[in-house]
Structure formats: C-alpha cells, structure tokens
Image (cartoon, rainbow, N blue to C red):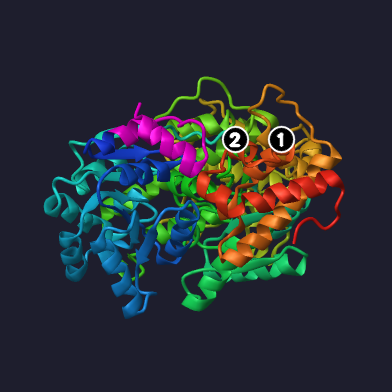
Amino acid sequence: MNTTAQSILNTVYGYPTFRGHQSAVIDHLVTGGDALLLMPTGGGKSLCYQIPALLREGTGIIVSPLIALMQDQVGAVNQLGLKAAYLNSTLTQREAYAVESQLLDGTLDLLYIAPERLLQPRTLELLDKATIALFAIDEAHCVSQWGHDFRPEYLQLSVLAERYPGIPRLACTATADERTRAEILTNLRLQDGQVFIGGFDRPNIQYRVVPKDEPRKQLLKFLRDEHIGDAGIVYCLARKKTEETAAFLSQHGFPAVPYHAGLDAATRRRHQERFLNEDGLIVCATIAFGMGIDKPDVRFVAHLDLPKSVEGYYQETGRAGRDGLPANAWLCYGLQDVVMLRKLIDSPSSDGVEVDEMHRRRSSQQLDTMLGYCEVTACRRQRLLAHFGETLATPCGNCDTCLWPPETFDATVVAQKALSCVARTGQRFGAQHIIEVLRGGAAERVLRLGHDRLSTYGIGADVDAFGWRSIIRQLVAHGLLALDPEGYGGLRLTSAAGPVLRGEQVLKLRRDILTPRAAGGAGAAGRKKAKRAANVLAAAASAAPDADFEPDAATTALFDRLRTLRKRLASEAGVPPYVIFHDKTLALMAQMRPTSEAALLGISGVGQAKLERYGEAFIAEIRAEESGVGEGVE
C-alpha cells in the first residue's frame, strides 16, 4: 500500500480508508500502468485518477463527455484545495489562454476537457508541450457503437496511445457488459492494460417494475407515498412527454422541470443548475440528462417508458443514491412501450443515420433482454447482475420480487384463449382489439368486422381488461406472440405458440397487481422514514455497531441546522450544497457533535482544506445548538 496515497486520502479527502480496488488501481497508475476500471456509480472512481495525478509529475488530463458538467466537477475539486480547470467552448479566448498557461506552467493538478476539444490539432499540440501525469477517460462506455451513449469522438481517443505512449491511461465506467469491455480495450488500445472490476451491485437501490395503468397517476402516487421533498429524475422516451410530465407534477405540488436536447442551451443549463443546487427538484428528461452528474442525494429514478436496453437502464438508475443512502429505481411499462420501441428498431433510419441489419438485430436482442428483466418472477437484482456476468448468491431482499413475491398461476388455458383469438382475427390486430373480442365487447370495429361471430368472442369475459393486458404482454415477453414488423402493434403467433395451443406445454405466468402488498422496505414504515431527515441519520449510522440507531429529536434538529448552514455557504461559494459536505458527513456531525477542529477532522468527508474553509462555521453551529441559540451563527 502506498502510504503517500493513504496520506492524501486522509488529509485532502477526509476519508479513513480506501474501498474495493481503489488502492490497487492507484498503485498501478502511479507506476505507469494502463487500466480499465469498472466501478458502480458512487463507488469512488474519481479518486482512482485524482490521487495518481497528484502523486505523479505533471497535470492529470480528464476526458469528460459533457461540457455542462465540467464546471461542477472542477468546483468540487477546487473545494478540496486542489488546483483544477477546464477547457471548453464556454470560455472566452482570454480565459482559455489563461488555462493553457497554467497547464504549461505546471500549476494545474487536473484539467478537464471534452473529447471534441482534446482532438483538435491545436489542443494536441498544447498537450505535446505540457507535462502530463496521466489521461483518465471517464464514461468510457461511450466508445461502444452498440451502447446507449455512443459518442463517435470516443473512437478517436486511440490517438492518446499513439501520441503519448509513455503516459498511463485509465478508462473508467460504471456500465459495461463483456462485449462493451472488449470494445473499450480494443478501441482505446488498452489491450495490455489491467482490468479492474469493482462489481455492479448497488445494494442501497430498491428496484421495482409496475405494469402501466394510467402511468402519470401511478407516478404521482409513488412520489406522494415515498418521495415528498426528494430530488429525483423521471425518464421519458419522447421530448414532448418530458414537458407534459413536468407540467403535470408541478400542477400537483412537485417542483419539476423538463430536460431534453430540443431545449435551447441556456434553458438546459438553467434547469441543470437548479437540479444541482436546489433540494427536492425533479427533472423530467430523455436520456440526454444525467451522464456524469455527481449529485449524491438523488433519492429516486423513475422510468415512465421502457428503456431500450439493460445497460441504459442500469446507467440511468445508477444516478440514484450515489451517497449510499436508500434510493428507489421505479419502472412503469406496458405493451405499448414494446410496440413503440419495435417500431424504432425496425425503422429504416435513426436520426437520419442508416441502421444496418446487424445493429437492428442487436437492438432487438437488447430489447428482449430488457423485457425478460421486467417479467422476471425471481430476485430482480440477481437477474440484473447476471446480465453483467456477476453472481449474487442469495436473493437481495431489496427489490419488488423479494419484498412482495409475485403470485404465479397456470395460464395455459387463458393463453390458449388469447392465442386462438389472435389467430381467428387474422393475426393483424393489436392488443386492445383482441381484448375487446375476448371480453365480448360491443366496440363498433368488432361488430363491423364480424368478430362478434367468432368462437373466441366473449370467452374471456371472466378476466378484466387489466388482466388481459398483463397476459398478452407476458405472451409477447415469452416469445409466444410477436408484434408485426411494420410496427403498428398488430399481434401474430410465433412457432413457440404451437405447443401451448395444442396443450403440449404448461405455461406459468405472473398475476399482476396494480399496488404491491405492504411489506416493509419502502412500504408504510419506510415511507414515514423517507419523509424525515432522520432517514439519512439512521442510514449514515448503519455502519456503526448499533445498526438500529434511531436519532432523537435533538439530533434531527441539528442535522437540519447543518443543512441550512451548508446551503448558505454553498450559495456564497457558488457551488452545489453537496460540494461543501455530503448529507452523510452532516449526519455524522449531528451524531458525534464535534466542537474542536481535531474532532471535526475525524469525521469522514472532512479534509484539511474543508476544515480550514468551513470548520469554524460548522463548529459554531454545533455549539449554538447545544447552547440553545435559536438562529445559530451568522
């Protein structure tokens, strides 16, 4: 173990020990090695390149994919007492020259730069003259042409290996299956580098999937039950839907803003800054939002549409609970989502770019895998981790299928009814029409086409519309029904339907319910906890011997005061509140009540620079609370 790295961890970052592969990655880079690092969101990837950059001669160059986030990343680093800057198009020419001079003078510890800027000949010539400690390529999965966040500029980053062969390179990401890892290693020319896999499990996130039935009302109930006053992200597939959802939530008392690529840059920047700086704001977004966001207290990520792939879903849900405290990943999906995504896959082009057959087939496979995840009846986390090649030995106890085990039933007969109805109506109608026929409905179209005279008319009247939607959706997910290749939602039988129709195969399906039974977790008791600051306090103490710690009123009051102080200090410094201290650090302060600099320095997350900058104010606030001073310090 490198004792110098340990010293930096203690004094600069205020953490007592390294976690997981951090120490090994740091040692490897310090000695000049290349590496690929897979570490879950919130696992501490940034330490793995920041500390080696401090230990090696020169400046660490961090390739970051989103310009809008660099300012926040640099602000957080500077709060640690380090010297960091960024180079991007938001700088004036004079400002850019000043940063370039700092780089050449060797006064910068870290320089953040977008791949597009780095690849410009002028920038490469600048780097040729500088002393570079290392290159860190963040969000390295963007190099994958099969991925959900593909950025063509990332393919050109192989130039770093060619142009700077003696400088260590670290590619890092939280999302990469085996195929994507191989692409990263090949395309970034890291085949000789060491691969560190820190695991994909995020045990603090509770994964849930619910069938669609008035999705906005379902989302509203979810928020009212469990996330009043919490910051979160709601993902939608269409830009218009993000705006409509944000307006709907705002009308019902939840502050929300939209975010998508169609908004002008100033609006996107304003909404992102509000999300980073305000407590309890919800962003309704397409996948354009969230990459690289460091906000640690996102308490939920909700999907109102089915994600295109498990990789995309994992990446997006990973933006919740970066602080390690309890968070929810809530997905609401229905058959119409599948229809829409199949149509997108089968369309001749995407955003004006021709899609080849191999890419279309890969996208179809990714969607099938996502459907399988949604319909699983065993532990959902085990299924998710298995997709990334990781085995969870026992069920997690913190997903919907563990907390509220789904009921399965022999669905052979109802499946035969549905499949027969699809066949007898000509294998060209969508689920709504099939359900109308099965239930004996009198819709004009059913009567006009004579489908009321079919033998399947009315044979499913004992099952309600929600039940039939669930059955048909699962028949699609199980591969017994397929959607027409034109993408209009028409259903047709597959070869797999034959054995079920002939009674040669028994079929078990899940009996869906709209509202899960109350059962701990984020249920009735959990909801009360989530509405109080005490939830954070209790979770922060979970590593202590007394895992059942329940904070008293005085501790909760002090925590609230410390958060108020933090917000004021952050506003004065022009940084998001979490950059000052995480909630977890404030929770430990509220519990341990340090009243000296030495005691405050012993709190995890308090480093030397932050002690010097903020220590006096927080100690004074703690003393004021203990002495009963109502307003605290000014």
Q: Is residue 284 above or below residue 421?
A: below
Measured as percent of width and height from the top left, residue 517 is found at 77, 35
Q: What residue is drawn where x is 54% and y is 57%?
A: 429
Circle number at residue 592 = 1
Q: What residue is drawn where x is 48% and y is 74%?
A: 262
The amino acid beneath tag 2 is Gly
Q: Compare residues 384 and 253 and report the one nearer the observer.
A: 253
Kindly report the secondary structure that dominates the magenta region of the rendered protein. Answer: helix
Task: Indicate left or right for 55 with 39 as reference.
Answer: left
Circle number at residue 602 = 2
Span of residues in magenta: 1-27
Label 1 CA crowd tier, 10 Å (few <14, some 14–19, many 20+): some
Q: Are marks 2 and 1 in contact (CB under 8 Å)?
A: yes
Measured as percent of width and height from the top left, residue 102 is found at 30, 64
Measured as percent of width and height from the top left, residue 181 is found at 30, 40
Task: Indicate left or right for 184 with 626 as reference.
Answer: left
Residue 127 colored in magenta in the image: no
Q: What residue is drawn where x is 27% and y is 60%?
A: 152
Please identify the quarter of the rendering in which residue 593 is found.
top right
Q: What residue is drawn where x is 76% and y is 52%?
A: 561
Question: Would you say residue 2 is visible in this rendering?
Answer: yes
Query: Helix, strand, or loop for circle 1?
Result: helix
The amino acid beneath tag 1 is Met
Task: Indicate left or right for 12 with 100 as reference.
Answer: right
Residue 13 colored in magenta in the image: yes
Label 2 CA crowd tier, 10 Å (few <14, some 14–19, many 20+): some
Task: Indicate left or right for 353 with 421 as reference.
Answer: left
